[in-house]
Amino acid sequence: MTCLADNMAYFQEKLNIQKSFDIICRMTMVADHKACFYFIDGFVKDELMEKLIEFFYSITPEDLPEDSAGLSRDAMPYVEVELLDGREEIEANILSGVLCLFIDGYDKCFAIDCRTYPMRSVAEPEKDKVLRGSKDGFVETVVFNTALIRRRIRDPHLVMEMQQAGSCSKTDIVLCYMEDRVDRAFLEEIRNRIQNLQVEALTMNQESLVECLYRRKWFNPFPKVKYTERPDATAASVLEGKIAILVDNSPAAIILPVSIFDIVEEADDFYFPPITGTYLRLNRLFIAILTLLLTPGWILLMQNPEWIPPAFDFIKVEGDIHIPLLFQLLILELGIDGLKLAAINTPNMLTTPLSVIAAIVMGEFAVKSGWFNSETMLYMAFVAVANYTQASYELGYALKFMRIILLVLTAAFNLYGFAAGILLTLLAISCNRTISGKSYLYPLIPFNGKQLARRIFRKRIKSGE
């Protein structure tokens, strides 16, 4: 490592510098020693490079320490400096954007971490909005995300542990936890799983990581982890003893282990007084149950009109039914998802006019043409809007899949199918397990009355808690 020419020959070939325009090798002088910088163009600011080069040109041979440790300690004009001696480690640092300095005659490489990443503003997440509370959110740069959590938890027990995964991508992964509150056995298990990952790259960031961490089968649609883009929600979960996993290039934190009661919680529950927070929580739970049972229950009543009380005769279909109600509802289930995909890919300037056209075509004209009855349009419109009461996309789609199964069973087997669909949904929830292997319904199963009351009712925060 002491010969600059040997180091340059190795890294010139290893990093394909002749072919890659953005990997820069910059020669300079440090006192009377030849030196060179390796860095990625775009990760290091020009002003900083100019100041570093100016500083090293100004050093005299008398001021230059003879050993690498002394030079790093006494003559490096930057805060984050690390000494490296393994070529593979140096290569990984260069490709990660770290500025690496080689000086002829010194046995170690000086890794100067002065990276700056292109990033968007720390704005409130589009999906995790709140009526009251902080308006900041995670971004794609993991260092900024850890800073947002540190800002909220000023405790020495808060640990930000760095890991890497992916033989090609070498993706940075941060385990965030409270050292005095975390389940140490589960933490060690997660750490070992990350370290033993045999993948080339985490192409889908946090989703790829979760699928690697959860080794059981994925037939159950109910979510195994909670995703959040809110630093305040992440900090609150960490203080409860949970682990937050931050993945570089992803604006969402992974919270685990979580039960279904953790997943349905939202920040707004805690930004309002206890009575309001309790109302919001119970309302969200009621609407979730209603979105699951509304259309299957209506199908059941349409198949058994004698069960409808006289006061509710208005729910019956008045017009002619050209297409069976089951197929109308299934077509609308698929059509609503198609409209969601179209809205995501629609340019902003066309969103309003196309939305108006879609509303007219899917509404009035669809009913007049005989494809759909107005009642099916009404109930599916409610279900489509009500799905957004859940902050978790995964939970919303799990309820959707269960609702479709419930619809088909009810149409095929009447009351027995309806009962079987509800039982299947309850089994899917109760048989689901968290990543730690514990009950998905805790504190309901196993039963803990005090904790269950805290999950359902928003309690007032008392001094000392």
Image (cartoon, grey):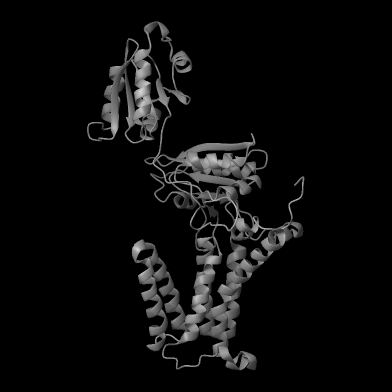
Where residue 211 sits: x, y (%)? 48, 53
Please state which of residues 121 and 205 is positioned toward the viewer in this rendering. Answer: 121
Where residue 58 sits: x, y (%)? 36, 13
Q: Quadrant of the N terminus?
A: top left
Q: What residue lies at 75% left-to-right and 47% top-to-bottom?
A: 465
Q: What residue lies at 66% left-to-right and 67% top-to-bottom?
A: 282
Please state which of residues 408 and 178 is positioned toward the viewer in this rendering. Answer: 178
Instruction: Identify the image quadrant of residue 179.
Output: top right
Where residue 301 sits: x, y (%)? 57, 87
Left or right: 172 as drawn, with respect to 240: left
Where residue 324 sits: x, y (%)? 45, 87
Q: What residue lies at 63% left-to-right and 94% top-to-bottom?
A: 310
Please state which of residues 464 and 224 is positioned toward the viewer in this rendering. Answer: 464
Position above or below: 464 against 311: above
Direction top: furthest residue? 62
Instruction: Identify the image quadrant of residue 51.
Output: top left
Q: Taking the image as drawn, is residue 271 in sight?
A: yes
